[in-house]
Amino acid sequence: MIPPFHQTVRRTAALLCMATACTCLFPQPADTLRRVLGEARVSAGRLPAGLAAATPLQSLDSADLRRSGAADIGAALRRLAGVNLRDYGGAGGLKTVSVRGLGAAHTAVSYDGLPVSDARGGQVDLGQFPLEQLGGLSLSVTDAPELLCPARSVAAATVRLASPLPAAGRGLHGTAALRFGAFGTAMPSLRLQGPAGPRTSLSAAAAFRYGRNDYPFTLRNGQLVSRERRKGSRMQAWTGELDMRHATPGGGELAAKAYLYDSHRRLPGQVTLYTDEGDERLRERTAFAQTLWHQRFGPFRLMAGGKFNWQESRYADVDAQYPGGALRQHYWQREWYATAGASWQRGPWGAAYALDLLHDGLNSNLPDEGHARRLGVLQCLSLRFAGRRLTATARLTGHVYRNRRSGGEAARDARRLAPVASVSWLALERRGRGGRAVRLYLRASAEEHFRVPTFTESYYYHLGSQDLKPETARRAGAGLSLLLEGGDKGWRPVLAVTADGYGGTVRDRITSIPYNLFVWRTMNFGKVRTGGLDVTLRAQAEPARSHLLVIQGNYSLQRAADLSDHSSRSYGLQPAYMPRHTGAASLAYEGPWLCAAVSVTGASERWSTHEHTAGTRLPGYAEAGLAVYRSFRLGRCRLSVRADLSNAFDAQYEVVSRYPMPGRSWRLSLQAEW
Amino acid sequence: MNILKYSAALLAATLLLAACSDDAPQAPVIDPPTFATGEGAYVLNQGSYYSGIAGSLDRISLWRGTYTPGVFAAVNGQSLGDSPQAGIVYGSRLYIAMYGSNLVWVVDKLTARIVKQIETREPEGICAAGGCVYVSNNDGYVTRIDTLSLAPTGQIAVGPNPAHLTAAGDYLYVSVSDGYNSAGGYADGFRVAKVDIAGGAFRKVKDITVGMNPGPIEADSEGNVFVVCRGDYAATKPVILKIAPDDSVTDFAPGSNIAVRGTTLYAVYNFTDWTTYESETTYKAYRTTDGALLDAELLPAGNLPASPIDIDVNPANGDLFIGTQPSAYDYTSPGYVYRYTSAGEFVCRYGAGVYPCAVIFY
């Protein structure tokens, strides 16, 4: 199924040839070229986005990502405060995100403005989006920053992914890159962008990833210590994207996107003592097409969008113990989604209304699950006052979900109202000579969010229950943003700090309870109390012209306590896989000759069981990374070369028990832009 | 030196650990050293594979009344492995079927020291007869292990997902569950494979039709075989069927787990109705020969296991041992082994490992 490596190399070479051919076929205007080359100069970083937002918003654009030392999307997500990444290790390992102590199903993911969903499992594998194909990513917590947004974007947490925007006013331009590294990983990619009219730009991108992922790890079994390798973890994935953006007269935009993803993965499974047998395979394919339109009409702003998403997941565990020699679980999901809304702005006052319609369908090769369907109608009414110092937003989102199922009982319908209120106040603003400035924002928010049961929780054979109620999360938080700008002279230092504390509860938690080793059931069971603190820091300085130092850091304290059952052993304890402390820090230097970034990420101890059973403690870890990169001109191209050393001190650790993470690894990236 | 070190560690652990936990529901009764035969027992803890908890082996000294957790790891300096299912003492050795780790451990029954590691795929049930140990492999086979050479000497196909097996007379009786075919209604199961092992033979003779999803299987002293048909954990409830020596099959009693000593069968019936979330658990004793109900309420209320996993009977004196989770919803923290006399009187509760699935007497 998975072609051998030499085929991969051939494909890589073919892609590079294509890239070269494109360069030759479409000569670039000289002014465009100058602009491109001009970008090679070190430019001071922007001010961090989201400082003035009433709810926490963290953004990392491509420059931030470059300077953070993150080599993959998993590492990038760890740069966001409040995030708890569940990572099964390696390039093909599942990567899901939970935020502020809520389950991953509370985290919404959007790509270029519209949601990426998984009605079956409720959590999106972010590993399918190669970091190199993204123009940036951000995390909004509690609420969406925009007044007018799809009702679905008003989530407890939303990871927003964005593809790179075409450069305005340029002819055909593009990027071709080849990245390869340890454990047989290779990734050629190509992106072509250009105008297709005075107001329209087109973009096409393709990327291929291959990895043997047979990284070594240390296995400790009592007094036996051995060096092993991950086996059966080879993966390959294709991603293809087509984008169109059209600037409509009067300050609007129509964007359309088509996306294809096809991956074959072998799943190494968890490390089992005394044996490394196992043959699990997963093929996933996704295709979606979406369009989103924004338009201004005087004080009004209109929005409309639609999306069709198709997903296929074919899992096989090849083992003679299963009927037919393999356990095969195939799922097909389809989602139709439409959103429309309008906002009105007059002076500091604004109001918005958005209506979302969605229809999810799931069928599988498992006879007991039937054909499940869900129709959702979401309406969101928003009011905002945005004065010079004070911004206050109130939203009320109404959710109605109707479930239907052929060949079995359907899950319970659900109706809920979810309110969110937030306020931000510019408490202090001082401006001095030479651009010196101090700004301090204070903010507070209160919210209620909920999630409906996933199709797996409702229908999976023997596990699912059709009686489940939605899981409800209530939370309140307060925080501050501080910005210090040192002015235009000297090192031009800038320091931005945010700190946000929160506390809340989760009721009617949806959880799976075992009946025996083979049969589990899903129930609404119990209550969890959450609380924590998220801190981000960004500092930059220019010690000399064209020399830039950037420090980025984030720290999260997450405390959650299971208050479901006073007599249970997990009562009051931190839930499984939730570290109390997580953090990341990086220091980047960018200069005319060489750029470098050192980084460290880490987490404190965790347990693989809710009861903190002896022997299930996963010790804390810290891993350090080093990146060296620079760009230079070669003919009409700007060439970028980057070398990454991840986990430089070869820390052996696990995020998920028995799924060892890769040790020290290297990666080399070559990129040509023209 | 290592022997001394481990012995010292074991001794220290033994002295530190009380036999019966103080937090048992009622005041524990100290185990009196009254056993003429039967020196001790091993408790096999399955662990929780998906929570990264390996299996473990504990030891109960029946005459001293002490409980020593983790003896395998302490003696051998390495973990027992993943997902142990069953064990048997035969001769001077203990044989443990390690489903997850694809092996059978052979350990000395007195010291728990490893004698041999025998690789075999997905072993689940285990029994012994005629100088051989037989293991049911979940991929459809029964493997014969010679106890002198400690090597597999044969393997026969019996059907999909053989669960447990027992020896009675000249035959092995193997539950063929088709347990991984729940979506297909366990259709290729519904049978017990009868295997001739007389005089060095090792061949399947016939399939005996039984109920849905057969699992635990035991023989009495009269050559009758009792098999638990576990049903589908939903509409079809667990029942015990009796296979007479002439291979005729009759309904015997409701039950999800059994232990047999002589002509007495101890049955645990444990069933949860997932529409109401209500569980029903009963403990009864039957006479195997005629099915007479000997004790309709074998265990008195007040000292009952929270969520029984397994029941075993000490062949030496008839004491009952029931492994249990700490609560119905807790499958990842240490469970207990409850001990009762053959009349059902509570003796004490041992703090065991995670998911104690078998008590093996020696």
Image: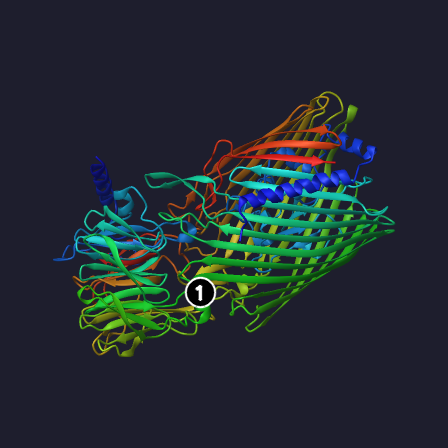
Q: Can you give x and y, in whole percent of width and height, for residue A545 in the image?
A: 73, 22
Q: Name the residue under label 1.
A: A324
**Along the line of sight, the residue nearer the viewer: A97 or A118:** A118
- Chain of the residue displaying label 1: A
The answer, for residue B226, to whether it is visible in the render is yes
Residue type marked 1 = Gly
Q: Can you give x and y, in whole percent of width and height, for residue B152 in the image?
A: 26, 55
**Along the line of sight, the residue nearer the viewer: A640 or A4:** A4
Quadrant containing the N terminus of chain B in the rendered view: top left
Q: Is residue B149 left or right of residue A669?
A: left
Q: Is residue A465 left or right of residue B177?
A: right
Quadrant containing the C terminus of chain B in the rendered view: bottom left
Residue at x 45% of width, y 39% of height: A216
The answer, for residue B277, to whether it is visible in the render is no
Compared with residue B332, is residue B246 higher up or lower down, i.e. above or below? below
Image label count? 1
Q: Which colour scheme is used?
A: rainbow
